[in-house]
Every structure is written in C-alpha cells, then in structure tokens.
Image (cartoon, rainbow, N blue to C red):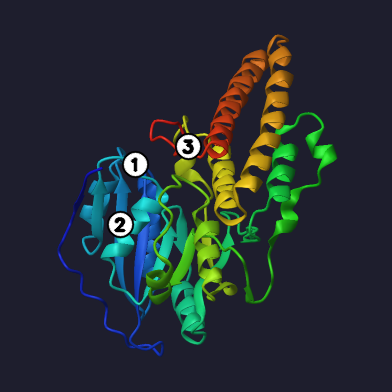
Amino acid sequence: MSSSLKTDPVDLKAVTSGVGATTVSICIVNWNTRNLLQSCLNSVRETLGDVAYEILVCDNASSDGSVEMVEAEFPEVRLVRNAENVGFARANNQLIEMSCGEYILLLNSDAQLHDGTISGLVEFMSNRPRVAACSPMLLNEGGRVQLQCQTFPNVLDVLRVAVRQHFPPFGPYLVRRASESRQCPSESAPSEIVSAACMLIRKAALDEVGLLNDKLLFYGEEADFCFRLKSRGWQVWYVPDVSATHLIGVSARQNDTLDTSWHLLRGKLMFLNRTRGRASLIACTSMLMIVFSWSMIYSVPRSLIPWGESKGIGSLQIARQYFRRLVLVTQLLIQHLWYIKPSNNIPT
C-alpha cells in the first residue's frame, strides 16, 4: 500500500466557547462519494462554532474527482491519498495516527453534522471522564431515527439473523425480526456498541486500547473497538440530545462486487472468535453452512422457472451468491478447526 499526504500544518481555531481548550480531530474516510463528501465537509464548516478542530480526510483511491474537489474547495483539510482501497479501519487509523486533537471524531463521508453536534458531544464527554466514546442520534434523509444502540453479537443473535434473512421461505416465519438487539432510548444512556458513522472518541482511551482492527475490511470495527474499551473499564454512551444525518451504505453500494451482507456477517464471526472463543465460531460457521446450502438448493430450481421478467436469471444469481458465501464460511471453519492462519489470497 502506498499513500501520499498533504503535509502543511493546520492551525486549530482559537477556542472562545465554554468547552475549554479542547481540540477535535475530524477523521473522514472517502471512497468515490465526491458529492456526499462535499456536503459532509460543508456541514463541518457550518456547524462547529467555537470548537477548535482540524479536518483530516483519507481518500481510498477514488476515481470520481473527490481528491481534486477537496484540494480546490477545502484547502484547510489534511489530505491522505491512498493508492488502493485499504478499507474503513486502516484508513481511519492512518488519520488517527497523524491527528493532534484531544478528541477524535470518526465521521462517515455520507454523514452531515447538525448545529451543536460536536460541541454537544464534547461537552458531554468533558463532564464524564470515564466515557471513552459516544455517538449522537442518527437520522436518515427523511428525518427518521436510525436504530443505533446495539448489544455485542453472540452465537444465537448471529444465527437468528442468518436464518431470517437466508433461509427461504421459512426464515421470516421461524424467527422474529431481530431488532430487539438495537434500541433507541430517548435520553442519554450507556450502550455496548454505538455507530462509527459519527463517533467521538477520547484520544486517551485510544492510546490505551489501541487503534481500530484493520483486519476487518468493512463492518465489525465498532463492536471490536467498543468491546476493547469496555473490557478496560471505559464507558460508551448514546447521546440523543444532539443529532446528525447519515445516509447508510452509500459507499458500499457503489461497489457491485462487494457482498456487504457477507462482510457484515464475517465481522460478527470474527468478533465471536476473539471474544467468545474458537468453539463459538466453529458452532456458528457449521450452522451457517447448513443455512447457505439450503438457500442455494432452494434458489437453483427457481432459476429454471422464468416467473416474471428476469425471474430465472435473478434466482440463478442468488444461487451463485449463496454458493460463494458457502465457500467463504467453509474456509473460515477449516481455518479455525486446524488453526490455519488466514491467507491474504483468500477472498473476503
């Protein structure tokens, strides 16, 4: 991996508000979301008020003019240009390592800050020294509250979601919708996991527990990071008194070859392996092999019956997708049965 960096130092804004001599390093990872990144950066400029800040952007080899837009319109931004897409966690780690703020704000390029978002989060954390990370209420484009607070994954949760989503046609009837693991409290409350789409982190806590897990290309970083925080006695909070807008998954949807459902599942499986032990991963992957095998078998005959326009072709593509997931989950099972170190050539 290679990258280049605009190295001119950035002067932090002078602090005049009541939050004290606090600085926030705003870290944004971008991949082909030029217009959304532009809106995100504008929202930062327009809403930070008197909070001292610096903005750092890591571009993961975009081809849509994102870098040129940042250089032309936001000269104050410290810009890292990666020669390849290194994923969310590794790109954020690059920015965190070069940041100088007392707090780090992880901000998705498809998110937009509202008035008082950062100042409210900073004030909340400055009054609670054991809070290591917090996140505001996240709203979709229509203003609806996103289900955000989550519990740490366990074997039953992973299997319940997998059966519901990937065990046609019985899944939705066998398993209730698994939204009970996410909550939306109306008042500030501790949470096991909060979203990294807009997460304020205390730098001192980062120094203690380490950076994001860059072995996860996409998804799962939040659970892993929050678990390490809580295992060291730090607290994670959800703060709905302030809000931000988040357009979920825009970057991922631009990559037609990225199986987001698999990466989300893989992140949970890796979390189980690290926190619940190898036996949990083996049990879970074994059951997933059954689920994906059934899904593939169910989809193949449907591909032979052209009910409706492109019905057969669509079912065949689904069958192929389940076959690929079956191969991937089988590889995970074999790796952990025989303690085989994952190869960089194994598809993720």
Name the amino acid, label 1: Asn
Residue 79 in the image: state x and y as whole percent. Answer: 24, 56
Q: N-terminal of the two: label 2 or label 3?
A: 2
The quarter of the picture where residue 189 lies is: bottom right
Q: Which of 232 and 133 is in front in this view?
A: 232
Q: Quadrant of residue 345?
A: top left
In 3D space, how far apart are the residues under numbered discs 2 and 3 (Cα atoms)? 29 Å
**Looking at the picture, which amino acid does disc 3 mark?**
Ile
Q: Mark 1 points at which residue?
A: 85
Residue at (69%, 72%) from the top-left corner?
186
Q: Is residue 9 above or below residue 6?
A: below
Q: What residue would you read off at disc 3?
A: 340
Numbered disc 2: secondary structure: helix
**Residue marked by disc 2:** 94
Q: Distance between the residues labelled 1 and 2?
A: 13 Å
Q: Which of marks 3 and 1 is nearer the N terminus?
A: 1
- Whole-percent x and y of residue 305? 73, 10
From the viewer's perspective, is the residue at label 2 or at label 3 nearer? 3
